[in-house]
């Protein structure tokens, strides 16, 4: 499936913190660069995520803010 | 200012495409890893973004989806 | 690719309105039920969307609000 | 109240899973077509949602992604 | 219609900038406090927004970030 | 840090409800005007939020909907 979200980046699952409704997942997408995601718990289970497994982060362009010092 | 958005990643501005209301900005955040953002045109101007300038992408954890092959 | 977004619904492209940065796309997902999307123009082109073509809408659970009369 | 969110679709509440801060609500919006939402628990309570009750899903156009096979 | 979005605040329309697909709308919600919104152009037209007219901003709790100095 | 999110409004923390993954934070941004936010628990802790402390809400223009009566 090809999706309209502009950003798809490959990474490795580094941390999984399950809550009641949501689960927090952290991926390393480049050496020393981590991205944290909060998805529903049932999505996390559906994807069979586990530590050190390969996965992707997917982000819509309108959800990316830009900042400068 | 310290913000609740979980993900702040430093990068370099690689492309700027201005529209009427919105502007599309692409940053390289690691060698070969680019992230594209759509922000309002007036925000882009307020930040004085220009090619090859350093900037950050800022993304809330709930805006990051996870995918697997 | 399997994605964490909870909602994936098949439909048919019914309308495409291109802007400068964004494109508006409307799909019919059930008889008489239409959903309108605004995606970046380059995403729309990458997906080769055209009228009456099959496509999916994908929506994160946190982006769905609920209302009552 | 008339809202700028482009998509308002009537449905029936099929599942409610309450968490500590958030609640997951699933509506059927057409025969066999379900949409899942995560809203704050206090919003769910304010709306007096209950199984088989009529309700609406409301989604902004920029929160709808499009995908193709 | 009662909606799950947690934040509904009354204000006055102070600025409208129409684009091709999107329109930027600024409301004053308290003396000196303005909030800017980008909605689709057709939504702006559907709401018959005009300068100095009363309107509401509606924001989901998950779309509100918090920052400190 | 200057961010592309269009809306930054100063307020005072009035309520904090911690969950397992997320925390709900309410700020008063003008007399009688409150805005509620849901952020990850670790973000809330990182910001050292506490009752009656000054803080800001930060909201992207595309996350602000507009409504009329």
Image (tube, coloured by chain):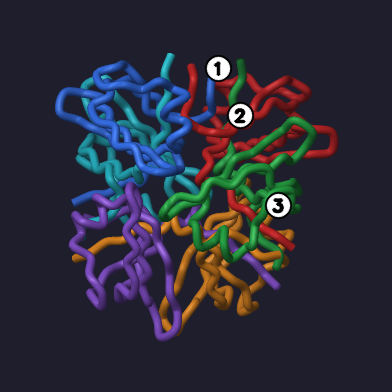
Chain colours: A cyan, B blue, C purple, D orange, E green, F red
Q: Which residue is mark 2?
A: F8
Both labels 3 and 1 in a single chain: no
Q: CA distance from mark 2 to mark 3?
A: 18 Å
Query: Is residue F21 shown to the viewer in this render?
Result: no
- SS at badge 3: strand
Quadrant of the drawing holding the C terminus of chain A? top left
Q: Quadrant of residue F69?
A: bottom right
Q: Are marks 2 and 1 in contact (CB under 8 Å)?
A: yes
Q: Label 3: which residue? A: E56
Q: Is residue F49 left or right of residue D37?
A: right
Spot occupied by residue D18 in the image (x, y as percentages of width and height): 60, 57
Q: Secondary structure at mark 1?
A: loop
- In the image, is D32 to the left or to the right of F22? left
Q: Residues within 10 Å of mark 3 (few under 14, many from 20)?
A: many
Q: Residue at x 47, y 30 (%)?
A: B43
**Can you identify the residue that label 1 sits on?**
B1
Front residue of B44 and F58: B44
């Amino acid at each position: 499936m090809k999706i309209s979200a502009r950003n798809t980046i490959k990474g490795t699952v580094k941390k999984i913190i399950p809550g009641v409704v949501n689960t927090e997942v952290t991926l390393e997408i480049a050496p020393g660069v981590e991205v944290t995601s909060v998805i529903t718990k049932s999505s996390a289970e559906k994807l069979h995520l586990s530590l050190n497994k390969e996965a992707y982060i997917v982000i819509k362009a309108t959800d990316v803010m830009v900042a400068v010092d």
